[in-house]
Amino acid sequence: MNVLSDGLTDSQAEAVHFINGPLLIVAGPGSGKTRVVTRRIANLVMNANVHPRNLLAITFTNKAAKEMGARVEALLPGQRIWVSTFHRFCARILREYGDVVGIKSSFSILDTSDQKQLLRIVLNDLDFDTVHFSPEKVLWRISDAKNDLITPENFNERFDEGVSNHWDGVVRKAYPAYQKALLESNAVDFDDLLMHVALMLAEQTELCRELAQRYRYILVDEYQDTNSAQYQIVAALAQHHQNLCVTGDPDQSIYGWRGARIENILRFERDFPTAQTIRLEQNFRSTGLILRSADSLIACNRQLKAKKLFTAQADGEPVRLLIFPDSRAEAAGIAQEIRDLVDTGDYQWSDVAIFYRVNALSRQVETALMRHRVPFQVASGVAFYDRAEIKDLLAYLRLVENPLDHTAFLRIVNKPLRGLGKTSQNRLLRWAQLNHLTPLEACVRASEVPKLSKRAIVGFRRFAEMINGFSLAGAGSVGDLLVEIIDKTYFVAPWQGSPNEADAEKVANVEELVAAARQYDEALGDDRSLQGFLEQTALISETDFLENTSGQVSLMSLHAAKGLEFPIVFVLGLEEGLIPHERSLQSESRRELEEERRLLFVGMTRAEERLYLTESRIRSMHGRTVPTIESPFIRELECERIDVDDTGEFAATQWQQPVPESKPTPGLPGIPKLMTGASLLNGEKESVDIPIGFRIGMLVRHPRYGRGTVTDVSGYGGRRTVTVHFSGDDKKETFVASKAPLQPLGE
DNA sequence: CGCAATTACCTTTTT
DNA sequence: GGTAATTGCG
């Protein structure tokens, strides 16, 4: 053996020295997976003579990619190993071979708000009212289809065969039109990056073979989170050489809502019959009690790939469940506890992390931390690249790079204000479409556009001249180009010297973007390109900004927490409706509830030494304060229950043993009992004027009559009545809201 | 015809 | 408590 095996367990060492053929590494939390993977890469290069350029390592997040890249480089100084995310990898392939599927290498990557904007136009063109069919929901369905590699044509076929539903009717028309609009703009959305590449590899066998030649050893991390498109990409490449190593943990699959297929990891051995499986079950991260508690929780899921977690570490501190009277006390209590822990001198700020299910929950904690003078960083909120002024500037760059980009054009043609309003824009674009011109070409010839005002003609012309005058070659670097754009458009002028704090922030953001561009210029040197910078900004996520060196407490969503570890972890809001999220309760399947359980499992197993779960007796959601119900997951784990009173003192503590295999949801299967109109009202004693959540058009469910739509609502409080039309047997029934077991289903 | 303030809407998780 | 479409005004 050699230095690569130092300090490894037998199974870890086995994985490190595995070379050819398919390999599945089932790695529990804290089992040293990254260490194994990086050493395996080093082993391939050092001992198996694999050239680094023949290696392809894929992770899910940029952060993971960066981390893995850095650790590989530490083992292989001077060697360049390309660790990339799926999306980045696909972007690169598309730049190179996109013409095969009709995409030019200068393509733009649209973010979610651009997608919405584009789809809104498409829906309007199709005469769908965007009130009833919101772009978000349509987009969500399109995204689902793309993740499953269902093309617009396939979608149509399915629609013809299957039972029709009015949403699919809309999507059936909108999807092809949206896709056409994307191609006309020479743009792709996030899902397209994957779908185009997957289809390309399936159709172009020669190209697939060529790429498989280049990427002779493939490694995919977090395999349990791959969706169908990602699966197809990997499978297509690996079929040629079978040198595929995947790592993952079915218990940490938390992206089902994004189309991830947990089955992909479960069926690996069937897909690759010669596959070897190595399990990493020893946990080196958490103390005994933390691991035991997390394990008893996850044991309540129906598991297919059983995995035993164990640790050699001492039991340590118990998992603590802190119960607060309200969410303010919860936030303050967390802040105080962090202060106390740090004051003992055993910990520093950066040892602490706070996780929550929804980003909206961070706000109260942030205020409490500020009040207690606890330094912190948040991996969420308004993402930097989501800010309007940043997007606008990036749209300028996009339009320079890709003149076909309609979305970018629309975004900036009148920003800063040039007196080019909607009507003028529509006239111009309509004419451009008729004459098969790009928006910019149409601007140049604005005088030919019918009915345009003199002012508009001049405005469009000036705009086109300005944009056409911009180029990376002319400016020299991305940073310089950005500065040129800012100067020529007087971009920050409206905010400069304003006493308004928000305005000052905008100016600061612009400066930060310039700094980011300069940094990019520096890093890439002569390899810098506009598309390179744009790609980086499009595919970056907020988690990537987390600094692990600085002395700050980290706040993030449970999803963002995956792959990280902290000595001290707080998970807040252990309440029904939050963890598990109410959305997972509404669906009848157990699948989503299990995913919620895995999410909590992921959060808990981030903790090394101390783990706190918190809940609040009351919480205000959507502007209304309601009593909470403890998360059903709580009784599935072992913890010390601590009631905290108003003064922040620990009032009562009691030890709690897990109740094995609790029912998925109390009451009727799949129906959260306390969500019925009756109990909503009854639970809320006295206050009769609380508007109950029934609205016309709302979908509801009645245990006897089934699903229906609310057609009428009248009366208030205890006398509020709801009329429901049941589609099943085409009947109308009127109920007293406070008595009927009606369950709202949404809309 | 274009702009700015007001209203109505929604609100999971992320590449 | 935030954003986007809609309305009213210049």
Image (tube, coloured by chain):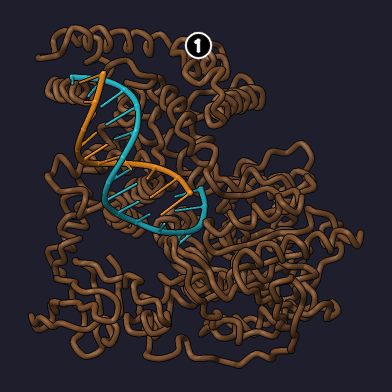
Chain colours: A brown, B cyan, C orange
**Residue A403 in the image: above or below residue A59:** above
Nearer-the-camera pick, A16 or B11: B11
How many numbered badges does the structure rendering display?
Answer: 1
Q: Quadrant of the C terminus of chain A?
A: bottom left
Q: Residue A433 appears in which quarter of the rendering?
A: top left
Residue A726 at what x, y percent from top left?
14, 79
**Residue A536 in the image: above or below residue A693:** above
Q: Secondary structure at mark 1?
A: helix
Amino acid found under the numbered disc labelled 1 = Asp
User: Which residue is labeled 1 in the image?
Assistant: A487
Q: Residue A399 appears in which quarter of the rendering?
A: top left
Crowding near the residue tagged with mark 1, few <14, some 14–19, many ≥20 C-alpha atoms within 10 Å? few
**Residue A369 in the image: above or below residue A324:** above
Give me the residue at 30% from left, 27% from top. Answer: A410
Give me the residue at 62% from left, 22% from top. Answer: A518
Residue A727 falls left or right of residue A597? left
Give me the residue at 22% from left, 8% from top. Answer: A455
Q: Quadrant of the N terminus of chain A?
A: bottom right
Give me the residue at 40% from left, 29% from top. Answer: A105
Whether residue A36 is visible here, answered yes or no, is: no
Nearer-the-camera pick, A557 or A193: A557
Instruction: Give the letter of the chain under mark 1.
Output: A
Residue A636 falls left or right of residue A645? left
Whether residue A208 is visible here, answered yes or no, is: yes
Residue A586 falls left or right of residue A335? left
Residue A345 at what x, y percent from top left?
92, 59
Q: Residue A43 appears in which quarter of the rendering?
A: bottom right
